[in-house]
Amino acid sequence: MSEQEVLAMLSEYASMVDSAVERLAPLEISLDYLERYYGRARYAYEPRALTEGISKPFWELMGRGGKRWRPALTILTYEALGGRREEILEFAALPEIIHNATLIVDDVEDDSMMRRGGPCIHRIYGLDIAINAGNALYYIPVHILLRKLDGERASRLAVLYVEQMVKLSLGQTMDIAWHRGLVDEITEDQYLQMCAFKTGSMSRLAVELACIVAGVGDDVREKLGDFGESIGVAFQIQDDLLNLIGDESKYGKELGGDITEGKKTILTVYALRHLPRTDAERLREILSMHTRDRALIAEAIELVKRSGADSYARQVSARIVAESWKGIEKLLKPSEAREKLAMLSNFLIERSL
């Protein structure tokens, strides 16, 4: 399946998932919505403020698109386990809402300018609204979805959700501390662990919530969760690659933004270890500048390429996904959904946008 065919598949899922997203996080928050999920007001609700402060910034970002591969992962996993798509749609919306909420907050933390081809949400609505909207959306969808499950499955989802959100925060902490220069050197394995926490947590959540709704055993759920986490790690490696060598018109963010932030990625970790000493020191110097100077960013990118880090990163991501697929291939009966899962995992490590 070509990249365009996978994108068409994701677009099909996106239209269904977006409808589910809107039910959990509506375009306009109404009194009916508030009373349904939060009970009657003790005094008086004021839904206009909630619409302006949560819904509008969230849908500003959602409306710009995005690949929606996390909900596709939930749906395909559930179908591969024998479930029907319509039974899982609202749950598939959960990782997508959380993912977009994290982007709003991450862009504040990174002082980013662009996201998906437009100004970051805090550039439009301000820091206060952006941070609060992102934080609110960490809780709103799971609060609603827990009410839709029986006690045992609700308990499992609640525990899973808290675990993955904690891991996500740990990963973000590592990433911030590294690009702030609070830690001088890191290893490749430490970088991969950061990815497993920061990006892998949401893809693990996407897979494991399908397992919980399907009622599969813990052993199968754990192995499928490992696969989901591996996809997240590989996706992050590819994102790091695209940030340096991608097509900016497709990428939707500033090319070389990771250089400006001084981020430690598999590319810079590899380059700093394999470049000649003088070149490595120059790359380290540019990363410490947090520069927006395009000439300096281009110089840093050239140094990374010279080290062979781009080729190495591709090999690592392909290996991670291949090994994780071997761990689950025999758990899933042959089906169209299983084949699509394999295609999706390959797409995420080969994509050009």
Image (cartoon, grey):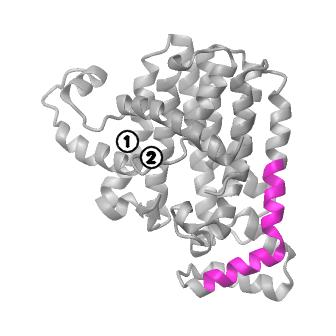
Indicate the position of residue 106 as horizontal and vertical percent values: 49, 57
Dominant secondary-structure state across the stretch colored magenta: helix
**Residue 111, placed above or below residue 1:** below
**Kind of residue at disc 2:** Ala
Q: Residue at x 41, y 27 (%)?
A: 143
- Which region of the structure is painted magenta? 296-318
| Label at residue 136 | 1
Indicate the position of residue 291 as horizontal and vertical percent values: 55, 81
Quarter of the view holding residue 284: bottom right
Quarter of the view holding residue 300: bottom right
Indicate the position of residue 312 as horizontal and vertical percent values: 83, 62
Q: Residue at x 83, y 75 (%)?
A: 307
**Residue 61, placed above or below residue 241:** above
The quarter of the picture where the C terminus appears is bottom right
Indicate the position of residue 50 as horizontal and vertical percent values: 24, 41
Label 1 packing within 10 angstroms: few (<14), some (14-19), many (20+): some
Q: Label 2, label 1: how many angstroms apart (C-alpha)? A: 8 Å
**Residue 229: in sight, yes or no?**
no
The quarter of the picture where the N terminus appears is top right
Q: Inspect the magenta stretch and tell me whether residue 305 lies in it.
A: yes
Label 2 packing within 10 angstroms: few (<14), some (14-19), many (20+): many
**Residue 301: in sight, yes or no?**
yes
Q: Is residue 160 left or right of residue 316?
A: left
First in sequence: mark 2 vs mark 1 = 2
Tag in front: 2 or 1: 2
- In contact (CB < 8 Å): disc 2 and disc 1: yes
Q: Residue at x 53, y 26 (%)?
A: 158
Badge 2 element = helix
Residue located beneath label 2 in the image: 101
**Residue 14, placed above or below residue 113:** above
**Kind of residue at disc 1:** Ala
**Residue 280, placed above or below residue 156:** below
